[in-house]
Image: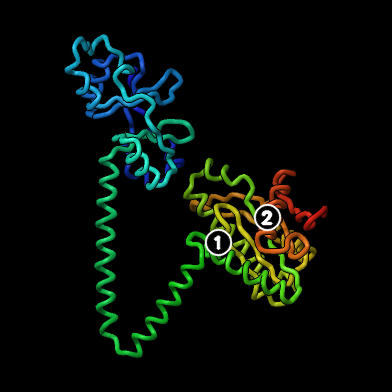
């Protein structure tokens, strides 16, 4: 059997791969002969066919190069030889949400010119070396346009007088410093800034003998959002979640005093962190419950009117009760988060006491 796949999983394919891959891939059963497959390839005007097993999973790829390699073999009969005997067996596949770097790595490592694209276990398209080269050329053209704009901006900058140039440099430096410390997607502080501030606040806490609390906040079952709505929608949900977190902690007067030293950061993926100087475990649990309740009660909008409601699990740890340094505090908060998720999610757990039970 030979057929052409329908791409019914567009929402599961990253925009980058969706834009460059070949849609409507021709597939062939392992039981067909080489001649039968070649005929269909000629009719479909394609240079590669994905060979599939009876259950629909990818078995191999048959290309024009495979055919040419066999043409001069003595005794080769295209009508009697099954395509499975000629194809490239066990080809590498790539997930539909993979990064370009992963695709390029597979092409370089395995030497394949065609790589099937799989979403949720189903074949949705094909990426070829030609597709990747076309994307790289487009990226080079885009980079060239950016460099031309940069040169134009530099020319305008050089025409400024000394005072204006100094002010412009200060503005640019401030912007670069801000970008280096913030997460591109959510606008919150990033992992690098959190680690730096954690080291500073631990030292301050140890010198002044004050408490320091760390909260790890993880969105429950976030993979379901990506699986159901796609990664672009997932990014929108992460941005909406970050706004809830920012407004709850920074704009909600969580504690009775000014909290200008609090840090709200994206730790990585769907995991976030709150660093609360001069805050004991009881006060940190109040903050955590405020965050948990706000997230649970606030629908997040995405894709022009769609909404989703998520919940969070939160682990709370406090210096010096649950750890003696930054590594200990991080480990304690992580352990508490793990127990909160293991206990059923949408709840808060604080860490065990340092060196013993809680």
Q: Which mark is residue 105?
A: none
Q: Is residue 16 above or below residue 114?
A: below
Residue behind mark 1 = 191
Q: Is residue 241 visible?
A: yes
User: Gap between marks 1 and 2, in whole Å?
Assistant: 15 Å
Q: Which mark is residue 331?
A: 2
Q: Residue at x 25, y 63 (%)?
A: 145
The quadrant of the rendering that contains the N terminus is top left
The quadrant of the rendering that contains the C terminus is bottom right
| Residue 323 on image: x %, y % | 73, 60
Query: Could you say whether the residue bearing mark 1 is in a helix, strand or loop?
Result: helix
Query: Could you say whether the residue bearing mark 2 is in a helix, strand or loop?
Result: helix
> Mark 1 or 2, which is nearer the eye?
2
| Residue 50 on image: x %, y % | 34, 26
| Number of marks | 2
- Outermost residue to the left: 72
Q: Residue at x 58, y 64 (%)?
A: 195
1 or 2: tag closer to the N-terminus: 1
Q: Counting other residues with Cα less than 10 Å from the Cα at mark 1, is it few (<14), some (14-19), or many (20 or more)?
A: some
| Residue 234 on image: x %, y % | 52, 50
Q: Counting other residues with Cα less than 10 Å from the Cα at mark 2, is it few (<14), some (14-19), or many (20 or more)?
A: some
| Residue 116 on image: x %, y % | 37, 33
Q: Is residue 274 above or below residue 233?
A: below
Q: Residue at x 49, y 51 (%)?
A: 303
Relative side of 161 to 92, left or right: left
Q: Quadrant of residue 353?
A: bottom right
Q: Residue at x 49, y 44 (%)?
A: 230
The foreground one among 74 and 217 is 74
């Amino acid at each position: 059997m030979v057929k052409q796949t329908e791409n019914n999983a567009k929402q599961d394919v990253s925009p980058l791969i969706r834009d460059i891959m070949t849609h409507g891939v021709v597939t062939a059963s392992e039981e067909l002969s080489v001649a039968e497959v070649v005929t269909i390839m000629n009719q479909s005007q394609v240079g590669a066919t994905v060979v599939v097993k009876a259950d629909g999973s990818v078995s191999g790829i048959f290309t024009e190069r495979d055919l040419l390699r066999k043409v001069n073999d003595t005794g080769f009969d295209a009508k009697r030889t099954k395509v499975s005997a000629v194809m490239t067996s066990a080809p590498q596949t790539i997930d539909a949400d993979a990064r370009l770097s992963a695709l390029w790595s597979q092409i370089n490592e395995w030497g394949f010119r065609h790589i099937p694209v799989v979403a949720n276990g189903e074949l949705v398209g094909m990426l070829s070396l030609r597709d990747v080269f076309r994307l790289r050329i487009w990226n080079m053209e885009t980079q060239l346009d950016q460099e031309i704009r940069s040169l134009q901006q530099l020319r305008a900058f050089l025409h400024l007088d000394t005072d204006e140039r100094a002010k412009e440099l200060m503005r640019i430096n401030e912007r670069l410093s801000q970008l280096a410390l913030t997460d591109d997607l959510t606008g919150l502080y990033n992992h690098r800034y959190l680690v730096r501030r954690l080291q500073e606040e631990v030292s301050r806490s140890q010198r002044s003998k004050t408490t320091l609390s760390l909260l790890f906040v993880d969105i429950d079952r976030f993979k379901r959002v990506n699986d159901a709505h796609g990664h672009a929608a997932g990014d929108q949900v992460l941005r909406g979640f970050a706004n809830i977190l920012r407004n709850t902690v920074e704009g909600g007067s969580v504690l009775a005093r000014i909290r200008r030293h609090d840090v709200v950061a994206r730790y990585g993926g769907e995991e976030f962190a709150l660093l609360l100087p001069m805050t004991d475990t009881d006060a940190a649990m109040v903050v955590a419950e405020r965050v948990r309740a706000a997230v649970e009660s606030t629908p997040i909008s995405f894709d022009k009117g769609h909404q989703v409601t998520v919940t969070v699990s939160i682990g709370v740890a406090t210096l010096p009760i649950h750890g003696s340094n930054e590594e200990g505090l991080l480990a304690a908060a992580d352990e508490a988060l793990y127990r909160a998720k293991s206990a059923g999610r949408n709840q808060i757990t604080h860490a065990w006491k340092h060196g013993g039970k809680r």
